[in-house]
């Protein structure tokens, strides 16, 4: 694999945009890097008082690794990433279904690796790179609204505390509950319920290493999917084997008025898997705190997610949040930032026509791909959660084919 690292484009004032991005999540920071490399100025407005991510793991697939490496992040990422060797598919009773050789797959598809991270490490690598390239990061900045001046093709961004920012291009990277999306549409637009929720937990691996049945999951980095009726469980190691990330996907029982993220009840979580492979029970016995997340999606936004003035667009979960059943939501947000940066890299001047064209191409590159990923996430919900029976038997036959796959 020969990574082409993007060089920063040098521009004069005639073609340099002043871009404001709302949200310093993985999508917003990735876009900051892509747009800074395109030679523009970037300010990132983040509501939180400090920049960080939820304490949980994240899988980065080869397509997203390619984008990250092109931003010059290979070295910093590899210092905190775990490279899983394979992905195991396991039936809910513990029966082997199939395994996918990640190293072989990566080698056969361009050489970019599968990487697993603690989210805070991935986030910090992006933040450091954005700052190194000159990003102005403003925390405690709760954006309430914006107004576009068609005449000048600029946008004024309003914060709850009365501050304002004027920008040539506003990018909404404010996540699944995006306020900017609602203003863009001119109506309330809650994300769609999926009927599932996720328990997210991190275990220290020291106890797991003492158990001969659990030790192989730590010593032999791998991603494991246990699949069964209505539920599945995913886990993998982080930080060189020091931590173990688990996500349990089960039917959503969070009351409608209880919010989307709450502290989970450990006995209730364990009860969901009491009849499953006893190795899951052993892992869950080591858990002392858990978060519970309602899973929602946004299947995309037609006919457009950019303002015709060329002064506003969006990316990431604000547009196309997906079920995490393909481990690709953040990957899609990073790709969005990469493509937006490349489109803005071609800008010859700051005219509305040039910005409109750049945003049209950005959307044209991203629309179908992100839609397909959301659809595939929903398909995986069905396929992973099949009840025992004929369809499940046929599915399990298909998983066996991973074992036979020849990557050479
Ligand atoms: P967010 O991460 O939500 O960032 C939005 C940011 O905007 C936040 O920092 C927020 O504070 C800020 N903000 C919001 N409103 C305002 C405002 N008004 N003013 C200023 N700032 C504001 N994806 C993968 O690729 N691989 C995985 O393995 C994976 N696993 C997942 C597991 C689970 C259980 C879940 C739920 C998701 C998973 N995802 C995964 C998906 C991934 O986490 C998201 O797709 C990704 O984080 C979205 O990034 P974003 O930047 O678009 O949004």
Image: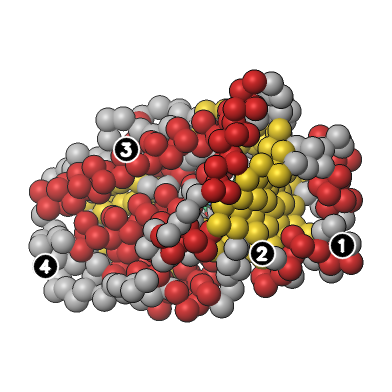
The picture quadrant where one finds residue 198 is top right
Q: Quadrant of the N terminus?
A: bottom left
The kind of secondary structure element at disc 3 is helix
Residue name at image x 64 percent, y 27 percent: 392
Residue name at image x 10 percent, y 48 percent: 353
> Viewer-proximal residue, 35 or 23?
35
CA neighbours of label 3 inside 10 A, class few (<14), some (14 to 19), many (20+): few
Q: Is residue 313 above or below residue 41?
A: above
Label 4 or label 2, whichever lies nearer to me, is 2
The picture quadrant where one finds residue 82 is bottom right
In space, the residues marked 3 and 2 are separated at their CA atoms by: 33 Å
The kind of secondary structure element at disc 2 is loop
In space, the residues marked 1 and 3 are separated at their CA atoms by: 46 Å
Residue name at image x 64 percent, y 20 percent: 390
CA neighbours of label 1 inside 10 A, class few (<14), some (14 to 19), many (20+): few
CA neighbours of label 2 inside 10 A, class few (<14), some (14 to 19), many (20+): many
Q: Which residue is mark 4?
A: 14
| Residue 342 falls left or right of residue 126 | left
- Chain-order first, disc 1 or disc 2: 1
Q: Which mark is residue 368?
A: 3
- Residue at far top of view: 390
> Viewer-proximal residue, 193 or 137?
193
Q: Which residue is mark 1?
A: 212
Q: Quadrant of the C terminus?
A: bottom left
| Residue 324 falls left or right of residue 91 | left
In space, the residues marked 3 and 4 are separated at their CA atoms by: 33 Å
């Amino acid at each position: 694999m020969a990574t082409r690292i993007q060089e920063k484009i040098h521009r004069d004032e005639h073609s340099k945009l002043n871009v404001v991005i709302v949200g310093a999540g993985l999508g917003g920071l990735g876009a900051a890097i892509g747009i800074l490399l395109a030679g523009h100025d970037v300010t990132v407005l983040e509501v939180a008082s400090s920049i960080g991510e939820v304490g949980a793991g994240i899988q980065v697939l080869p397509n997203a690794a390619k984008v990250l490496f092109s931003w010059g992040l290979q070295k910093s990422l590899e210092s905190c990433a775990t490279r899983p060797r394979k992905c195991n598919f396991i039936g809910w009773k513990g029966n082997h279904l199939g395994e996918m050789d990640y190293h072989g797959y990566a080698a056969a598809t361009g050489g970019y690796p599968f990487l697993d991270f603690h989210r805070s490490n991935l986030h910090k690598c992006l933040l450091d790179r954005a700052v190194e390239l000159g990003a102005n990061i403003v925390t405690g900045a709760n954006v309430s609204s914006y107004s576009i001046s068609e005449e000048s093709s600029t946008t004024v961004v309003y914060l709850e505390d009365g501050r304002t920012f004027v920008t040539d291009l506003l990018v909404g990277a404010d996540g699944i509950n995006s306020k900017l999306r609602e203003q863009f549409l001119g109506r309330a637009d809650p994300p769609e319920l999926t009927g599932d929720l996720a328990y997210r937990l991190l275990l220290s691996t020291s106890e797991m290493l003492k158990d001969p049945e659990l030790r192989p999951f730590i010593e032999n980095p791998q991603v494991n999917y246990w699949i069964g009726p209505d539920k599945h469980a995913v886990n993998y190691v982080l930080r060189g084997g020091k931590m173990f990330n688990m996500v349990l996907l089960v039917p959503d029982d969070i009351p409608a008025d209880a919010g989307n993220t709450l502290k989970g009840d450990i006995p209730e979580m364990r009860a969901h898997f009491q009849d499953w492979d006893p190795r899951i029970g052993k892992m869950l016995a080591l858990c002392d705190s858990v978060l519970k997340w309602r899973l929602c999606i946004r299947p995309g936004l037609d006919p457009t997610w950019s303002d015709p003035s060329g002064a506003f667009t969006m990316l990431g979960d604000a547009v196309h949040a997906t079920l995490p059943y393909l481990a690709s939501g953040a990957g899609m947000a990073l790709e969005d930032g990469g493509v937006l940066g490349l489109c803005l890299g071609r800008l010859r001047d700051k005219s509305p026509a040039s910005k409109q064209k750049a945003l049209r191409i950005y959307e044209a590159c991203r629309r179908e791909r992100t839609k397909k990923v959301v659809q595939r996430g929903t398909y995986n919900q069905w396929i992973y959660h099949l009840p025992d029976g004929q369809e499940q038997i046929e599915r399990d036959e298909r998983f066996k084919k991973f074992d036979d796959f020849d990557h050479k």
